[in-house]
């Protein structure tokens, strides 16, 4: 096992009706800025529940945070905080709203050009406004980690940052809030969480039995319950397990002390940049092709994945690996997610654009060994057609 | 899944050589009180490493904290803090030293009689001195939770308390520090962690797949690696996995959102009170007998335990349950721990004393359903002879 630090101070309030606990989590004299995305937060009644739970506190609201949240939008919220004197931020939404809120929390306390927060990947962040979240979409894990991704449309950049100052103070996870989500968002969330786990698990062995066993538990849970979540949207236990799984998929626990990959994410980001394909769907395209291509360096963990996640234990090594990759693809298909570039309007002639973008963005040494080059990515994408 | 709160702010620094990171974790101007137990901390060189890492800080030391740490001893440390003006506590040791340090941290900031901290089970604690830990013995999980047990010899009481103010600020977990532990302590630590997990897992199902899968991973890890830790004391990966497992066994994660038992602990405490049998060994006596007795209410989880932890999947229900309980007993035996009351000098005629003590201490509704009475405990102990 590699040396590691694990430190996650976010207070999770999980279960039915937990929005009513907001009152105990936010100072009584706080002026709260509620941040949210589109109209669904209002339509589903979540915003109403939140307003009620905040009681007599002074409240300002800022809606319209988009998927792949924009720098310009976030900076408008920073201005609102300055104008209104808000003292506490409350994100109500999924990963995009929470990511934007993290950036807004850091930017509103930053002395200098907030763009530096992103170009430094968070290194310049010395403090942030306190913020909590009410999660409405299980997917990104942003509700219990300190990372965020912000898009700057003008600069054509989608940049991540991390800061120990950007953990939510608390996150409310009420599985019932997910009952009204469209199947497409549930499917994307499950696929996103699945690949988060794989990026931290399917590398090379370092005798980290606990982390491996936890990752395998989370993967099996998604495989068993993901399709059920589509079939039975109001099954509480299914939604509860999916929600907690997606949070634990990226809260630092399963990634502690093990190598991490993230190449599928980096390649996938360029597909989204190219034609706006949903993030999770780019992962479902890239991951199986990447696993197939990288079966040499990933051999031991691919065989472990086949055995412990898919119960594939018979046959030659390569046949078991083939079967595990095929099972992965089938799982995405069961979630209604296609796994070929062509399914998303990316032609063979577009691969060059995507590969060039990787080079442009400095993504030239990807994967757990830093050994996946843009040329390797080209080969991977060609087999993903 | 039941509603739950999960909030664990302790910063874990895990791995080889992490004591040298102490310098970054404790304020440079702190006056540090180092708390430790017997002579082994000095003999093994751990205290030397700690002193070196603390650099120029002012340091005071307080040794002699005993197993089952005493109220009187802790109160002496509280006086040292007042006399010396210490501002930061550093526990160097196992669960006893860390438990004592939690109490000392709370007592030294408490206005009133510190005995109330224990009689209120921590409810009166409003603040505590900051403290960190350097863990030398994987067992109790105290390094990443907010609970402690303190013994008052004069009052004949061993009382637990819990407070959100009593999480360690940080804990350093260096598996190499465990190489020199006597086999008896390793065995006790493994058995203690094992039963911690069982108390949170082997109750009745609430569709908590993630918590169940995590618990099963931790149990399998102890079963596979416990005996190896005895055979090969300097196998880093074995010690690392055991150390991380013991921490995760009682840091709130696997117990979140599920029923909990703790009857084996409560009954075991009375055996320790009776004749000072090692805590872990009392658990190894009580647990198998209790599982056998409670096979009705615990049926579903016993079958799940048989299948997922011991791979016992064939035969009638009761035969599988029998086999799982027998496998549990065998595991303790492989760790060099006997599982019968008679092995520890407790005779049939002593059971009455132990059962009476349960009643005296108000332990009349034990287990996940509050349905285990002292009379049930008597029956359980009779079958544990």
Image (spheres, coloured by chain):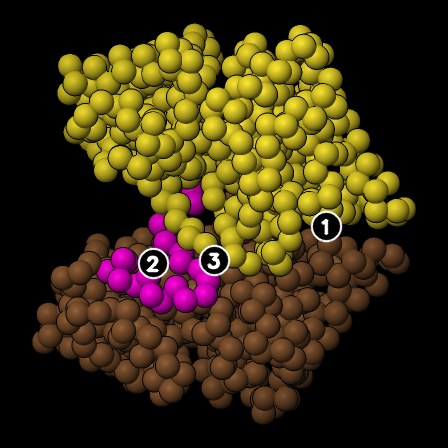
Chain colours: A brown, B yellow
Judge by depth and name the residue closer to the eye, B246 or A160: B246
Name the image quarter holding residue A239.
Answer: bottom right
Per the image, the residue denoted by label 2 is: A170
Q: Is residue A156 left or right of residue B265?
A: left
Q: Is residue A369 left or right of residue B98?
A: right
Q: What residue lies at 46% left-to-right and 62% top-to-bottom?
A: A15
Q: Secondary structure at mark 1?
A: helix
Q: Categorize mark 1 by other alpha carbons within 10 Å: few (<14), some (14-19), many (20+).
A: some
Q: Is residue A169 left or right of residue B80?
A: right
The vertical placement of B108 against B12, above or below, is above
Judge by depth and name the residue closer to the eye, B336 or A58: A58
**Which chain does the numbered disc 3 sit on?**
B
Compare marks 3 and 1 and give the one earlier in the sequence.
3
Are dots 2 and 3 on a single chain?
no
Per the image, the residue denoted by label 3 is: B3
Q: What residue lies at 39% left-to-right and 49% top-to-bottom?
A: B7
Q: What residue lies at 50% left-to-right and 81% top-to-bottom?
A: A181
**Residue B249's spot in the image, x, y percent?**
54, 38
The vertical placement of B43 against A338, above or below, is above
Q: Is residue A322 left or right of residue A336?
A: right
Per the image, the residue denoted by label 1 is: B300
Q: What residue lies at 73% left-to-right and 43% top-to-bottom?
A: B296
Q: Secondary structure at mark 3?
A: loop
**Which chain does the numbered disc 2 sit on?**
A
Q: Secondary structure at mark 2?
A: strand
Name the mark nearer the viewer: 2 or 3. Answer: 3
Name the image quarter holding residue A333.
Answer: bottom right
Q: Categorize mark 2 by other alpha carbons within 10 Å: few (<14), some (14-19), many (20+).
A: many
Name the mark nearer the viewer: 2 or 1. Answer: 1
Range of magenta residues: A1-26
Residue B351 shows in the view: yes
């Amino acid at each position: 096992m590699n040396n590691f630090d694990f430190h996650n101070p976010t207070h999770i309030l999980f279960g039915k009706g937990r929005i009513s606990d907001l009152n105990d989590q936010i100072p009584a004299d706080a002026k709260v800025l509620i941040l949210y995305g589109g109209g669904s937060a209002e339509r589903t009644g979540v915003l109403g529940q939140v307003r009620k739970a905040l009681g007599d506190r002074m409240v300002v609201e800022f809606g319209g945070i988009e998927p792949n949240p924009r720098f310009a939008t976030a900076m408008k919220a920073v201005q609102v905080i300055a104008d209104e004197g808000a003292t506490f931020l409350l994100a109500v939404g999924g990963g995009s709203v929470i990511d934007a809120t993290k950036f807004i929390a850091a930017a509103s306390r930053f002395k200098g050009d907030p763009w530096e927060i992103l170009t430094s990947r968070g290194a310049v962040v010395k403090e942030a406004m306190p913020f909590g979240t009410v999660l409405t979409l299980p997917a990104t894990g942003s509700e219990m980690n300190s990372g965020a991704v912000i898009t700057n449309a003008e600069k054509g950049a989608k940049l991540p940052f991390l800061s120990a100052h950007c953990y939510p103070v608390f996150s409310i996870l009420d599985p019932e809030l997910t009952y009204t989500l469209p199947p497409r968002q549930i499917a994307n969330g499950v696929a996103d969480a699945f690949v988060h786990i794989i990026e931290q698990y399917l590398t090379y062995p370092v005798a980290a039995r606990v982390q491996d066993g936890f990752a395998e538990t989370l993967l099996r849970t998604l495989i068993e319950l993901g399709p059920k979540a589509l079939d039975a949207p109001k099954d509480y236990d299914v939604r509860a397990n999916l929600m907690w799984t997606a949070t634990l998929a990226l809260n630092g626990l399963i990634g502690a002390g093990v190598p991490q990959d993230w190449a599928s994410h980096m390649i996938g980001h360029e597909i989204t940049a190219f034609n706006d394909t949903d993030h999770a769907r780019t992962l479902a395209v890239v991951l199986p092709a990447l696993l197939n291509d990288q079966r040499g360096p990933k051999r031991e963990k691919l065989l472990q994945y086949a055995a412990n996640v898919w119960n594939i234990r018979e046959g030659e090594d390569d046949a078991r690996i083939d079967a595990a990759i095929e099972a992965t693809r089938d799982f995405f298909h069961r979630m209604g997610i296609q796994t070929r570039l062509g399914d998303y309007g990316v032609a063979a002639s577009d691969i060059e654009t995507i590969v060039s973008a990787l080079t442009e963005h400095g993504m030239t040494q990807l994967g757990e060994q830093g050994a996946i080059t843009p040329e390797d990515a080209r080969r991977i994408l060609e087999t993903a057609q």
